[in-house]
Image: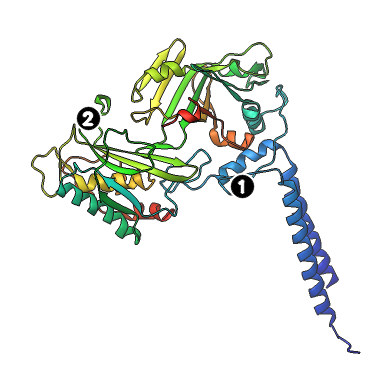
C-alpha cells in the first residue's frame, strides 16, 4: 500500500482550486438557465423575455419611467395592413409629469415622429428613410394610441426622390432614396415631441429589437411581387 | 489557511449572487444591454440589428463594367479598384468589361455593375455618381454604381475645363460605398461626401484603411 503524503498547505490549495471550479460551473449553468429563452442581437448579447409593463406608470419616475414607457410603446405594437394603407398601433401610458400631474402620453407629447428605415438597401452608404410626423392621439384611458397611418398608396404615386410630402395633418420626409421604392421597412426611431418641441422623448429601433426580440418590420407589397 | 479558503468561497458566492440579481431585476434593464450588442460602426452601413454590412468572405467582388465606358475611363476604374486592393493587401474588387442589357433597371439581379448613365433624374442632377447596395442580413449581395454622364463631364489624366470631375477619384469613393462604407466626416478620407471639380483625391488614407480593416 502506497501512502500519499500531503502537506496541509497543498491540501488547502487543492480544495481551493476544486471549490473555484465548482462555483464557476454553477455560475455557468445558472446563467445558461436564466437566458435559455433569450436570443442574440448582433450575435453578442442575450436578452430575457420581458414581463408585461403596466399602463399606469404614475408610481415611476426618472430613468425607470422612461424605460417603462419604451416597453409600453413596443410591447404589443403591431402593423395593420391593407392594399393602400399601413398602420402602426403603439402602446399608451399614463404617468406623472414634472408638475406631478397625471397625463397620458399624447397629453405630454402632442406630436409623434416615426422614422422607418428600408431593409436590405443602402444608397450612397445610407439606408433610405421615411419620416412621418403627425399629431399624437388616443382615446381616454385606452391602453393603445390611435392607429398611426402611413398612406402608402399616395407615397407610391410620388417619385422616390421627392423630399417632402404633406397630406392633412401628416407630413412625410424622404431621405436617401434612389429611383425605386424599397419594399421592406423597419421602425427605426420614434420621437415624441412636447408642446415646446424641446427635449423630445426618443426611442430607437434597437430598443424595439430588445423589447420584442426582433425589429418591427413590414412589407409594402406581398414578397412574391418583389423585383 | 482555512480562513483564506473561507474568504475565497464567500467572495465567489457573492459574485454568483450579484450576477443572478442583475439577471432577475427589472426587465426594462435589458434595453441598456442592446446598446452593447450593436457593433462598432467602423464607418460601415449597419443593418436594423446594428450589425455591420459588408461582403464578408465573398471577395473579390466581380463588377461588370458598362461597355460605354471609354478605354481611358475603364482604365481609371481599374486603377480605382486597384487602389483599394493594394491598400487592403488583398483583391477586393475585380472589374470585367462585358455587354449587358441596359434596359434592365439596376437592382436585385444579383449582378454588380458599373453603369454609364446618360439619363439621370432632374431632382438629383447634383449627384456625380450613386452606389446602391442590396444586402441580406449583414451580407451584401449586389452593388450597382451609376455614373451621372448626363450632368457632368469627366477626365482621366488632365482636365479640359475647371468643371470636370477626376474619374479615378470619383470611383475610388464609389467603390468605398460598394465595399459597404458610409460617408466620413473625418479629413482626409476618400469617403468625404463631396468631390470638387478637378480635385484629385485617390489615396486611401489611414482612416479609410482603419475602417476597411474592420471587415476585410
Q: Is residue B72 left or right of residue A54?
A: left
Viewer can see residue B186 = no
* Residue in the picture at 32% in, 36% down: B106
**In what quadrant of the picture does the N terminus of chain A appear?**
bottom right
Viewer can see residue A6 = yes
Q: Position of residue B186 (x, y in %)?
A: 34, 46
What secondary structure is found at the residue carrying circle 1? Answer: strand
Q: Would you call the spot at circle 2 few (<14 residues within 10 Å), some (14-19), or many (20 or more)?
A: few
Q: Position of residue B52 (x, y in %)?
A: 47, 46
* Residue in the picture at 36% in, 36% down: B107
Residue B11 position by quadrant: bottom right
Disc 2 and disc 1 on one polypeptide chain: no
What secondary structure is found at the residue carrying circle 2? Answer: loop
| Residue with the mark numbered 2 | B119
Say which mark, if any, is on residue A45.
1
Q: Taking A106 as reference, is A225 above or below it?
A: below
Residue situated in front as seen by the camera: A149 or A53? A149
Which of the two marks, 2 or 1, is nearer to us in this view?
A: 2
**In what quadrant of the picture does the C terminus of chain A appear?**
top left
Q: Would you call the spot at circle 1 few (<14 residues within 10 Å), some (14-19), or many (20 or more)?
A: some
> Chain for mark 2?
B
Q: How many marks?
A: 2
Q: Is residue B11 left or right of residue A79?
A: right
Q: How is the image coloured?
A: rainbow
Residue A41 position by quadrant: top right
Q: Position of residue A179 (x, y in %)?
A: 33, 29
The residue lying furthest to the left in this view is B160
* Residue in the picture at 76% in, 52% down: A30
> Chain for mark 1?
A
Residue situated in front as seen by the camera: A197 or B89? B89
Q: Taking B10 as reference, is B162 above or below it?
A: above
Amino acid at each position: 500500500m502506497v501512502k500519499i503524503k500531503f502537506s496541509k498547505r497543498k491540501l488547502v490549495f487543492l480544495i481551493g482550486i476544486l471549490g473555484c471550479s465548482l462555483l464557476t460551473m454553477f455560475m455557468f449553468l445558472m446563467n445558461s438557465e436564466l437566458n435559455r429563452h433569450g436570443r442574440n442581437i448582433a450575435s453578442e448579447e442575450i436578452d430575457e423575455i420581458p414581463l408585461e409593463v403596466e399602463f399606469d406608470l404614475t408610481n415611476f419616475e426618472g430613468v425607470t419611467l422612461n424605460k417603462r414607457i419604451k416597453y409600453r410603446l413596443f410591447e404589443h405594437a403591431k402593423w395593420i395592413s391593407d392594399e393602400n394603407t399601413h398602420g402602426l398601433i403603439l402602446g399608451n401610458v399614463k404617468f406623472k409629469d414634472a408638475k406631478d400631474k397625471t397625463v397620458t402620453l399624447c397629453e405630454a407629447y402632442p406630436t409623434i415622429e416615426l422614422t422607418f428605415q428600408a431593409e436590405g438597401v443602402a444608397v450612397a452608404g445610407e439606408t433610405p428613410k421615411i419620416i412621418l410626423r403627425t399629431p399624437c392621439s388616443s382615446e381616454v384611458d385606452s391602453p393603445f394610441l390611435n392607429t398611426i397611418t402611413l398612406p402608402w398608396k399616395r407615397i407610391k404615386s410620388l417619385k422616390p426622390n421627392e423630399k417632402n410630402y404633406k397630406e392633412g395633418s401628416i407630413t412625410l420626409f424622404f431621405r436617401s432614396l434612389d429611383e425605386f421604392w424599397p419594399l421592406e421597412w423597419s421602425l427605426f426611431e420614434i420621437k415624441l415631441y412636447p408642446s415646446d418641441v424641446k427635449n423630445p422623448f426618443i426611442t430607437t429601433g434597437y430598443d424595439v429589437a430588445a423589447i420584442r426580440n426582433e425589429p418591427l418590420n413590414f412589407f409594402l407589397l406581398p414578397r412574391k411581387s418583389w423585383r | 489557511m482555512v480562513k483564506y479558503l473561507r474568504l475565497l468561497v464567500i467572495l465567489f458566492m457573492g459574485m454568483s449572487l450579484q450576477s443572478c440579481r442583475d439577471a432577475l431585476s427589472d426587465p426594462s434593464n435589458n434595453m441598456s444591454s442592446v446598446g452593447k450588442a450593436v457593433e462598432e460602426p467602423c464607418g460601415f452601413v449597419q443593418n436594423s440589428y446594428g450589425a455591420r454590412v459588408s461582403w464578408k468572405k465573398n471577395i473579390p467582388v466581380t463588377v461588370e463594367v458598362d461597355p460605354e465606358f471609354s478605354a481611358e475611363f475603364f482604365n481609371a476604374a481599374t486603377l480605382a479598384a486597384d487602389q483599394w486592393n493594394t491598400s487592403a493587401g488583398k483583391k477586393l474588387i475585380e472589374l470585367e468589361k462585358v455587354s449587358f442589357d441596359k434596359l434592365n433597371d439596376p437592382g436585385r439581379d444579383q449582378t454588380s455593375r458599373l453603369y454609364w448613365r446618360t439619363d439621370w433624374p432632374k431632382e438629383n442632377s447634383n449627384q456625380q455618381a450613386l452606389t446602391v447596395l442590396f444586402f441580406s442580413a449583414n451580407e451584401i449581395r449586389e452593388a450597382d454604381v451609376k455614373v451621372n454622364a448626363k450632368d457632368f463631364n469627366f477626365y482621366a489624366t488632365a482636365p479640359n475645363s475647371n468643371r470636370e470631375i477626376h474619374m479615378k477619384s470619383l470611383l475610388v469613393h464609389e467603390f468605398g460605398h460598394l465595399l459597404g462604407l458610409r460617408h466620413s466626416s473625418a479629413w482626409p478620407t476618400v469617403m468625404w461626401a463631396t468631390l470638387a471639380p478637378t480635385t484629385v483625391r485617390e489615396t486611401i488614407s489611414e482612416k479609410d484603411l482603419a475602417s476597411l480593416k474592420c471587415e476585410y
